[in-house]
Structure formats: C-alpha cells, structure tokens
Image: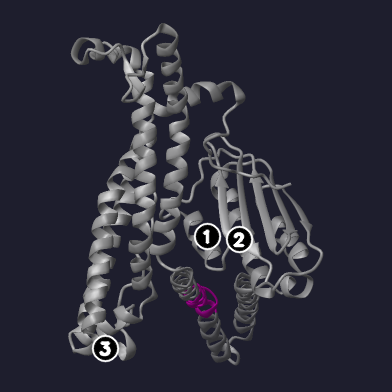
Amino acid sequence: MATAYRPYEPGTEPRGHLVPAALKAPFQDRVWREFLYLVISLPMAILTFVYTITMIALGAGLLITFLGVPVLGAALAGCRALGVVERARARALLRLDVAEPEPVLGRRGGRGGRRGPVAWVGALLRSGTSWRHVIYALIHLPWAVFSFTFAIAFTSYGWGFATYPLWRWVFPRYVDEPGLQVFGDDHGRAFYLDTPFEITATCVVGVLVLLLTPWVMRALTSVDRIMVAGLLGPSRLASRVWELESDRGTVVDTAAADLRRIERDLHDGAQARLVALAMDLGLAKEKLDEDPEAAAKMVDEAHGEVKLALQELRDLARGIHPAILTDRGLGPALSALSARCTVPVTVTVDLPQRPAPAIEGIAYFTVSELLQNISKHSGARTAEVDVWRTEDRVMLQITDDGRGGAGTSAGSGLAGLSERIDAVDGILVVNSPAGGPTTVTAELPWR
C-alpha cells in the first residue's frame, strides 16, 4: 500500500489544542501582517486606480493623434510596475509567492526577434498580462475600501471593547460623562456604558470580536490572494509553457548524458577489448605457420576476450533498454533486476495492463537507480518494490530498512532522478528519517 506524506496544515491539531490556538490567534503575527496588508491596500488601490484611469483615458483621448499609442503603452507599463510592488507586498505580508509574469517581449524579443520602442509598445498592447494588470487596478479599489473598513472596524472595536475597563476612567475625569455614550438625542436622553454589568458585557463582546477577527482577516485576504495570483501572476498557459521548456531542457540534458555514458562505456569497454582482440588475432595469424601451438593458445585467449566483449555489450544494451522489458513487461523486468541486487528484494507488481513504453522504461530505470542506491549506500538487509496503478497514474514505492538519511538535495543522485521524473509530469517523494526506514514514492503518468 502507498504511504501518504502530507505537510503540516493549520487547523489539523488535536481537539485539545483548539481552544488555546483560538485564544492565541489575535496575538499571532499572521493576523497583524494581514491587518497591515489590508490597511496599506487602500492607499495603494487609490494610487493604482487614479493612475490607471487617468492614463487610459488620456491615451484613449489622444488616439486621434500619434501620441495616443505611446501613452497607452506607458499606462500599461506603469500598471505592470505597480504590479511588481503589489506582488512584493503580498510576498512580504501574506507570504504569497507569485511568480513574475512573462516579459513584455517574451524570450525572443517579439515578432521576428525585433527589439525597440515600437516593438515594445506593440507587445505591451497585445499582452494579456498587461490588461490583466489594468483589470486588477480597476476592481481592487472597491474591494480595498470594503476590506479596509472591515479590518479597521473589527480591530478597533475588538481591542477597544476588550480593554474598556482599563480606559473608562477617561470619561468621568476629562469628559465629565459616566462612560462611553452609546445613544443620545436632543431631548437629553442618553445611554452610557457605566454599570458593572454593562462594562463586563462590553468587555466580553470585545473579546468575542477579537477571537473572530483572525478569521475575518483571513477571509478578506483570501480574496486578495486570489486577485494577486490570478491577475498579477503569469497565466496558466504561460506557466505551462515555462514548465514544458524546463522539462524539455531536462530531457535533452538527460539524453545527452546518456549518450556520453554509452560512448564512454563503448570506448573504455567493448571497443578497447575488440581492439586488443584484433591485435591478438593478428599476432596469431603471423605465428600460425611458425608456431601453431602458440597461435592456437592465442586464438583460445582471443575466444575468451570475445565472450567478455559480448557480455559487456549485453550489459550495455540492457542499460539502454533491456529486452525483457520490451518482451515481457515491467513485472518480469523488475524481478530480473531485483535478482541482481545485493539486498534481498520483494517485488509486487499489480498492473492491469502495460503502460506506455516510454513510461514503462522510466519506471524500470527509476527502480534500477533506487536499488543501486540501496546496494551501495543504505546498509539495508531487505527491500521491497511495489508497483500499482491509481486512476491514470503509475505508482512506484521502494522501501528499505537501511540507515536512512537520503534526500533530494542539490547534487545528489535522487535530485537528478527527481528532475527526470518531473520532466514527464511525475512526482518523487522521499521519506528517509535518520536511522531509517527509507520510503521513496514515485508517481508517473500512465500515458
């Protein structure tokens, strides 16, 4: 069975910790960061709205002249610059890390690779990202007014009422009133919070508002998170293109590394052995008439060299793509692979049918590399390999009882393996605490 590894999530604490967590919530830095974000949002929204409306209106009015297009370009460029500030503000106060959107001229400098003011303005006007920044500037102001009002109201009333017994003395001493006035009219009728019951009730209401404030802040900033991520970040299409470009680079680098490895193995192994074999056969040919016994001995040695060269070529071919994987599938191929491991391995493969050949090969070599790591580094006594299908994904889980401590840090073999799996939209999860056991779970697409 697969083992699920999930990061810690707020709100999943045992029941016994819910009350203390709720009491501590108004004092946590997250609440004050979100409050500061909502307070700053109003002046930022006013600045962004005024700039956008002014520049867009000015550019649209000047379209009858040649100045309209560059003014519109400047408006969009300014909106993108303000978007940089908004992303930085969200990153600092909301801990929301939004990637930079696609550059104005892209990676090739626009159409035909041209760069210059005209191409830059044209790219700005054609960019959907630029117009999404304009939309953000227009819709953020009404929301900023709403969220600013609620944030100020809940914070001020919550802390004001909760601490009312501490500052009620101000009214009789400096205002000549018995307490905070709730109601008053021109006929002299007034209602003050001055009795012990009213003071206590006010304090209790303030505490309840304070306990509710963190959830209000979270709800308000969740809308800001959606707007910043959806309008100021890269589009889904651009993100997918960047991801595919990165994956393509990983695939190309991996293929180049495999070709270099094959070339090195051929040059240092079978090729060198065949060169020596050719020289031995040449010497045997020269001695065939003079010393037949020595020639026969040399031919016999050459025959042994041929067998070794053939074995090396078989091993090399198996490293490229084993024949048993092509002919019989992943189950028999992994069983044959585990038989060569220095650690006893139990293999369980539960696949209703064979996945795509490319995925089958990636799964095979993933298990192969992990078993090599177990043999060389883990110090394990036993290992298990489980393979199964979940919907449209192939799941691999390799477990050993070794010393643990494995990770996907930069430069490690698992880091390279993780990059190769990610190149085909796969996921590699490593759970290897010090002292073991180690569980590596790989998820690959079925097709």
Q: Is residue 402 depicted above or below 74 in this figure?
A: above
Work out how far the residue at label 1 is from the one at label 2, CA to CA, in angstroms.
7 Å
Question: Please, what secondary structure does the residue beneath circle 2 have?
Answer: helix
User: To which residue does mark 1 refer?
Assistant: 417
Q: Are marks 1 and 2 in contact (CB under 8 Å)?
A: yes
Q: Are marks 2 and 3 in contact (CB under 8 Å)?
A: no
Quadrant (top left, top right, bottom left, bottom right) of the C terminus: bottom right
Query: Can you tell which quarter of the image residue 111 is in?
Result: bottom left
Mark earlier in primary sequence (2, 3)? 3
Point out the residue furthest to the top here: 196
Work out how far the residue at label 2 is from the one at label 3, CA to CA, in angstroms.
44 Å
Instruction: Let me know if residue 106 appears in the view.
Output: yes
The stretch of residues the image draws in magenta is 258-273
- Toward the viewer: 351 or 102? 102
Residue 379 as seen in the image, left or right of residue 408: right
Q: Amino acid at mark 2?
A: Thr
Mark earlier in primary sequence (1, 2)? 2
Q: Amino acid at mark 3?
A: Arg
Q: Is residue 366 magenta?
A: no
Point out the residue furthest to the front here: 187
Instruction: Let me know if residue 340 appears in the view.
Output: no
Q: Residues within 10 Å of mark 3 (few under 14, many from 20)?
A: few
Q: Amino acid at mark 1?
A: Leu
User: To which residue does mark 3 refer?
Assistant: 114
Question: Please, what secondary structure does the residue beneath circle 1 have?
Answer: helix
Residue 238 as seen in the image, left or right of residue 64: right
Q: Residues within 10 Å of mark 1 (few under 14, many from 20)?
A: some
Q: Is residue 260 magenta?
A: yes
User: To which residue does mark 2 refer?
Assistant: 366
